[in-house]
Image (cartoon, rainbow, N blue to C red):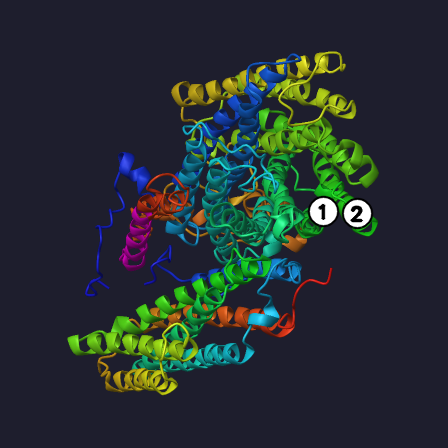
Amino acid sequence: MTTISYPTFIRRPNEYVSGIWGWLTTVDHKKIGTMYGVTAFLWFLVGGIEALLIRLQLARPEGTILSPEVYNQVFTMHGTTMIFLVVMPLSAAFFNWIVPLQIGARDVAFPRLNAFSFWAFLFGGILLNLSWLTGDAPNAGWFAYAPNTEPQFNPRNGVTYWILGLQILGIASLAAGFNFLTTIINMRAPGMSFMKMPVFIWMTAVVNVLIVLAFPIITVALIQLQFDRLYGTHFFNPTMGGDPVMWQHMFWLFGHPEVYILILPAMGIVSEVLPTFSRKPIYGYSFIVFSGIAIGFLGWFVWSHHMFTVGLGPAANAAFSVSTMAIAIPTGVKIFNWIGTLWGGSIKINTALLFSVAFIGMFVIGGLSGVTHASPPSDAQQQDTYYVVAHFHYVLFGGSLLGLWSGVYYWWPKFTGRFLNEKIGLWHFGIVFFAFNLTFFPMHWLGLDGMPRRVATYPEGMGWDISNLVSTIGSLMLGVGVLVFLYNVVYSNLRMPKTASNDPWDGRTLEWSIPSPPPHYNFDVIPDVKYRDDFWYTKYPELAHNTHGGGSDLESQEDHDGDHADIHMPDPSYYPLFLGLGLAVMLGGFIPFTGHWVVCAVGLIIFIWSFLGWSYEPVNG
Amino acid sequence: MSNVATTEDHYTSTGVDNRKLMMWIFLGSDCLFFGAFISTYLVYRNRSLAGPYPNEILDIPITTVSTFVLLMSSLAMVMGLSYVQQGRQVLGRYWTLATALLGMVFLGFQVYEFSHFAHIGLTPRTNIFGTTFFTMTGFHGAHVTFGVLWLLIFAYSRLAISFKNKMLIVASFISVVVAMAGLMMTETLDVIPHMPFSIAMAVTAIGLIGTITSLYLLKSPDTQPEIVSKEEGNLELAGLYWHFVDIVWIVIFTVVYLVSAKDGAPLL
């Protein structure tokens, strides 16, 4: 290999580069996962501040903190940030950290592509938020309905920032989707057939199938909107034969699978936490896996339930109503499976388990209010009211975020070698759980009482004052809860000793068979998997049923200690960073400010340079 | 060995190469990309409020020719991959080059079509037909362009060993452009006044002869490459992509030129 000369652009850094360059050039899935998590948490603080501004504005009638124009920008950016910059990348952080560890791989299939996904996500988020500096943030809501986004109604650049920012985030998600699907299909340890994969891996696979199939649709929709806004086409312009409802179809054809992209990772996490702390296998593994697949599949046939009030006609409304209600079946199966997992288990109550149990409860509430939207007549009452806001915060905050927090407490010892403090953790859980319900439960009443969403203020005497005030108080407490979590993280890093053993929770899956934190090559010896929950039966071979036979081969771990010099991991690379930067600068250059084509050209040059460099980069060892 | 392998061994759970698996997943994703554009086109059929309408402007015979060229490029792609896999690198690269050149001819037809439409008054701004037609076929053309670059880089990577060969490759590119220019002249008589048809045909012929000659003169190295399997893998990926893009064109050709060719003004 060494005899072949490659054209090199910059020298590839070697494996042991450390410090800031170690992070900027890393292709290690664990470091990338950490960067995803930290970045997403910072965006979470930004989105949280935006949420608090909204609640402060609405605390009393005739609020004057935000002007209506700024209010539009704040709620648009709150929604966009929380979906694309917080929940999706937080899920990606878990995919990165956990997928290779649970399937017994040393890294993902395409490590540099993985790093590129992260950098594109980071720069896309920055481009989106740069719009604040122009005083002209996106203001059309997270679903950006045409014709409100058409140039004649929204001539300033805010929506263009939104389009191009989302385009970059979409490319990042697609690259990650290709990568994780390939990893899960192709990089499983020998013996780990599909039906022996942990449930989290299954849910990750379903999510990435959804990403791979749903994001091209929003890509096209964004291209069409961009062409309408910048180049005078007529996709959504009714005066020239276009149709604004087309945007709604395109958006929700993406947008509904997107909500399963947001919730299924949390469902996967909960399906790992509950068996561990109940000391039982997951109840009805096949059912929980197939219902996850069914949710992902049915999710493609329900998009028009977001459009019941558009007037698609009774036939379409009835069909989409039925398909929407059908989704409650696999979801209900999952709920019963989780309860069945807890039932009769020797339950160990701690913060991770509490978050998972709270997830089940809150998700049931959000799911039930969702079923009420599935009926077109009742939906006509609820459309565009705070009832909808209550619903999706119960599934996205009460569902996704509580599930993700459960995962944080569960895997933190694996990530860092330290535990998060249990006492602070219980405070964190208690405050967040109470404040969450205080914030969002009154919104059900507000919505049924007729308060519309996306209004900058409301008059006195509508009977909405107390509920709004309670909700605002709850949201401030929620902010305190998040700060308690932040304190816990800092406390853990400064005060908690590095005491986590390989297997602090007596876990079931492969990530617990290796040290905490794992070495950069993960596994000394790639495990040979014989069973579902293989690690558990290795520890307790007497629990394996007759059909399971004996334990498997993890004992050889010790023999190979210190013998890992022959494990070749991919070298770090500069190109993912530059490719992501080039992409963001190039697409950012489409925003029509003075001299924007120069910016675009610079981005193109960076992009081509890093693309060629990437292609010709020599491979180590 | 490969740029993207993570570990020294090449074990995969399914036995399929990682990059090949990812290419299939990407193509699945790309189906929805084109599916969205094609659906938009179909939804907006017969909804243009101003001309030119499809029945006034679409030229089925000339697009049939360009479609034939693109389909033949798929044949060339199959030949190229087959020879490379047999270890006959030289022939493999000729056919790869031929694939790329046929792709360029297809793109030339598209350039001609776009400029011709613009000339007689159909742009993306004119009406909803123009809006949907140009974006759909334009993004398909962008895919073909990317494929051409990929194939050229592959073909060039081993043929460009001497100055003479590099010049011949450049000459072959230029000849294709000349041939395309000739073809465009035959159709744009009103753009270039008094351009006799015979001259246009002569330019076309010169371009074609130049292409064939420069390719014939290209001498290839006798040395066998050290790493064949990676090259095979790369060409196989490019081939998957290329056939996919061709299939998409068959759908677009059917939808635009066959199904909606008679669409006129909307029946109000």
Above or below: residue B108 compared with residue A575? below
Residue B17 in sight? no
Could you say which disc has been placed on residue A179 in the image? none
- Name the amino acid type tagged 1: Ser
Q: Are marks 1 and 2 in contact (CB under 8 Å)?
A: yes
**Crowdedness near tag 1: few (<14), some (14–19) or many (≥20) residues, C-alpha within 10 Å:** many
Which segment is the magenta one?
A601-621
Where residue A55 appears, as percent x and y from the top left, is 60, 18
Q: In the figure, is residue B248 to the left or right of A281? A: left
Above or below: residue B75 compared with residue B233? below
Looking at the picture, do discs 1 and 2 lie on one chain? yes
Along the line of sight, the residue nearer the viewer: A27 or A354: A27
- Name the amino acid type tagged 2: Asn
Could you say which disc has been placed on residue A317 in the image? 2
**Numbered disc 2: what chain?**
A
For disc 1, the marked residue is A304
